[in-house]
Structure formats: C-alpha cells, structure tokens
Image (cartoon, rainbow, N blue to C red):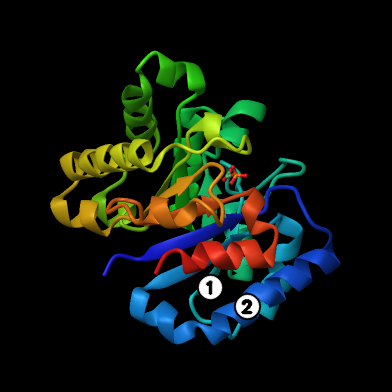
C-alpha cells in the first residue's frame, strides 16, 4: 500500500518550549492512534527548524509512524560555508527527511533548479529522503503554463536520478499562489496536477514507481478542506504550513486521511 504522508512544515516558528510542547502533543496523539496508522500506512513527518531537531529526535525516539525532517540542507559536503548545515550533519543526528525546493527557498533565497538538483543528490548520498516541492506562480497558471513549469522543475532537479534513488523521493505539489494565502487549489485543480505529476513519473521511470510515489498537496490545506483534497485518488497526503502549528488543527488534518 502506498504510504500516506502528512508533513508539518513549521517554517521559522516556535521557541524551544513551544516546540517541545507541540512535539509531545503530536507524539501522544500518534501513540493513541498507532494501530490505525499502521492499517492505513500513515506517516507523520515534522519538518522543524534545525535547532530543534536533536531534541525532537530524543522526544520521539519511541513513537512509531513519525519521522523528522529538516527544512533545507546545503549543496556542499563540508567546509568553509558559515551558517550552513550539511546533509551529513542531518544524517548524523538521525534525521530521515529533508524538504528541498520549497517555494520560499526558491523565491527568497534564489534557489534555482540546478541548485536544487545538487541538494537532492547530497540528501540521497547521506540517506535522507527528499520531500521535493514543485509549484507554479499565479501568473504561470493564468497563462496556462502550470503543467509546463512543473514538468521542468521535475526534469531539471529530480528526473536525472536512477529509479532506485527516485524511489526515496516524495513530491509535494504546492501552487505558490496558495501558500499562506488562504487560497487553496480546488480539489479538482490539485488532483489534475497530481495526475500529471504521476504520469510524468510513469513516463520517466515505470508504472510501479509512479504508483509507489507519495505525492502530497500543500498550500492553505487546513482542517476544513483536507478531507475533500485527500479523497482524491492521486493526493497521498499533505505538506502543511500554518495549520501544523496547532496540535488540534494538525490532528484534524491527519484524521482527514482516513
Ligand atoms: P501553508 O504552507 O499551509 O501555510 O499554506 C504550506 C507550505 O508552505 O508548505
């Protein structure tokens, strides 16, 4: 059964005490639902600010169906890159996932497809699973270029991977115009793009890999709209920003999966 993933992207939010409290709340929730999680093949991923990962790994060490992610990693292995964090460092503390290509990284930090390819390669070299984000800007959708934009993002940064490596990648479709704006892609719009992404994976790799890849939706996904989005065949979960910062909302979103 394909893995369903609900990933929380906390972005640059929470102090340490707040972070610990929310991690404990989510962990307690998962412990009470773990049989359900097992039956439905659900995984919760918490993408935390770097400084909380080590503490979070300790808190969650006995929690099944929960993995931790970084929100970024650097393109180089090691060296004189003040302020950067390498994939190897993340691996060495036990991080399992890393978000790569989030639109905020693309837009505010000028990360282009070539840079993202290097990050994807680096992550996989150190056994981190990338959650690779793709998404079009509003003007690209208005000009009917959204399928082309997503196709190029995939081709330029992840489709160079051998199939065995690609099998460790999850894709998150996040239309940029829907992130943090309260505007969600309609379930039909989202599902169409997810079908397109899956067909691109099929064309580039195989039917099996296309079926097994988790494709998440992100962009103003919340407790009110999650169930309808997740009811679509090709939407395998979500990458949740704002609504992941509160345990009750986040739990409702997880519950929408089944
Ligand atoms: P949002 O963010 O849910 O706050 O729109 C999603 C994301 O940026 O991953």
Residue 46 drawn at (x, y percent): 60, 62
Q: Nearer the viewer, residue 76 or 45?
A: 45
Residue 87 drawn at (x, y percent): 57, 54
Residue 141 drawn at (x, y percent): 41, 21
Image quarter in which the C terminus is found? bottom left
Q: Earlier in the sequence, mark 2 or mark 1?
A: 2
At x 37% / y 40%, what residue is drawn?
190
Q: Nearer the viewer, residue 71 or 83?
A: 71
- Secondary structure beneath dot 1 equals strand
Position above or below: 143 against 37: above
Left or right side of 118 for 169: left
Q: Which residue is disc 2 drawn over?
A: 27
- Secondary structure beneath dot 2 equals helix
At x 40% / y 50%, what residue is drawn?
229
Residue 81 drawn at (x, y percent): 71, 40
On the rendering, which quadrant does ligand 1 occupy?
Answer: top right
Quarter where residue 213 is shown: bottom left
Q: Which residue is disc 1 drawn over?
A: 66
Tag 1: Cα neighbours inside 10 Å, few (<14), some, or many (≥20)? many
Q: Does any portion of residue 178 appear in the rendered image?
A: yes
**Is there CB contact under 8 Å for labels 2 and 1?**
yes
């Amino acid at each position: 059964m394909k893995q369903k993933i609900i990933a929380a992207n906390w972005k640059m939010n929470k102090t340490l005490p707040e972070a610990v409290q929310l991690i404990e709340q989510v962990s307690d929730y998962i412990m009470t639902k773990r049989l359900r999680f097992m039956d439905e093949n659900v995984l919760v991923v918490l993408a935390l600010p770097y400084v909380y990962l080590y503490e979070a790994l300790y808190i969650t060490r006995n929690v099944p169906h929960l993995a931790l992610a970084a929100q970024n990693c650097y393109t180089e292995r090691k060296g004189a890159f003040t302020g950067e964090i390498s994939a190897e460092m993340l691996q060495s503390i036990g991080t399992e996932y890393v978000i790569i290509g989030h639109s905020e990284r693309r837009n505010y930090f000028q990360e282009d497809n070539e840079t993202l390819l290097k990050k994807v390669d680096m992550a996989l070299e150190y056994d981190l699973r990338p959650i690779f984000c793709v998404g079009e800007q509003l003007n690209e959708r208005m000009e009917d270029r959204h399928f082309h934009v997503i196709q190029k993002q995939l081709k330029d940064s992840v489709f160079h991977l051998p199939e065995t490596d690609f099998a460790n990648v999850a894709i998150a479709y996040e239309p940029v115009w829907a992130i943090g704006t309260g505007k969600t892609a309609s379930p039909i719009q989202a599902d169409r793009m997810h079908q397109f992404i899956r067909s691109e994976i099929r064309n580039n790799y195989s039917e099996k890999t296309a079926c097994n890849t988790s494709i998440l939706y992100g962009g103003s996904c919340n407790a009110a709209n999650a169930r309808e989005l997740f009811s679509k065949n090709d939407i395998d979960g979500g990458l949740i920003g704002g609504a992941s910062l509160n345990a009750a909302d986040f739990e409702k979103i997880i519950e929408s999966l089944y």
